[in-house]
Amino acid sequence: KTTMEKSFYKDILSKHEISTIIPEEGDREFINHSIFHEFSKDVFSSETKKRYIKIIKKLEEDGAQGIILGCTEIPLLIKQTDINVKAYDTTLIHVRATVEFANT
């Protein structure tokens, strides 16, 4: 099971009345493969970027109003300017929360 199939984000978001949509199985397999076999080797190809954008557009058509970029490497490939919906970079979110916590 990939992280996006587990209930981590879904449970937290549902507490705030936000429903989640995850990519289809083949798309999840592609994402997982790209993370472990490309990004971890510092490979960020234009073909992979096109596929991610296609996956995101499909999710948008299914009603997604935002996309969680839930792996540290995905924001190296996908930028907010690449997509029409709000991108949530979890690395940046965690860093900001850590700095805020450290300053309290």
Image: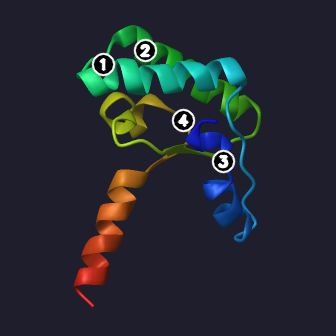
Residue extending farthest to the bottom is 104
Q: Earlier in the sequence, mark 3 or mark 1?
A: 3
Mark in front: 3 vs 1 = 3
- Which residue is identified by label 2? 48
- Which residue is identified by label 3? 6
Q: Which mark is residue 44?
A: 1
Q: Residues within 10 Å of mark 1 (few under 14, many from 20)?
A: some
Q: Secondary structure at mark 1?
A: loop
Residue placed most toward the observer, 38 or 95: 38
Above/below status of 92 relative to 42: below
For the residues labelled 1 and 4, say whether their Cβ atoms are less than 8 Å apart. no
Q: Residues within 10 Å of mark 2 (few under 14, many from 20)?
A: some
Q: Earlier in the sequence, mark 3 or mark 4?
A: 3
Q: In screen coordinates, is 9 left or right of 21?
A: left
Residue at x 25%, y 21% (from the top left corner) = 41
Question: What's the distance in space between the residues labelled 4 and 2, CA to CA?
Answer: 18 Å
Q: Secondary structure at mark 3?
A: loop
Question: At label 4, which amino acid type do we have?
Answer: Asn
Question: At label 2, which amino acid type do we have?
Answer: Thr
Mark in front: 2 vs 3 = 3
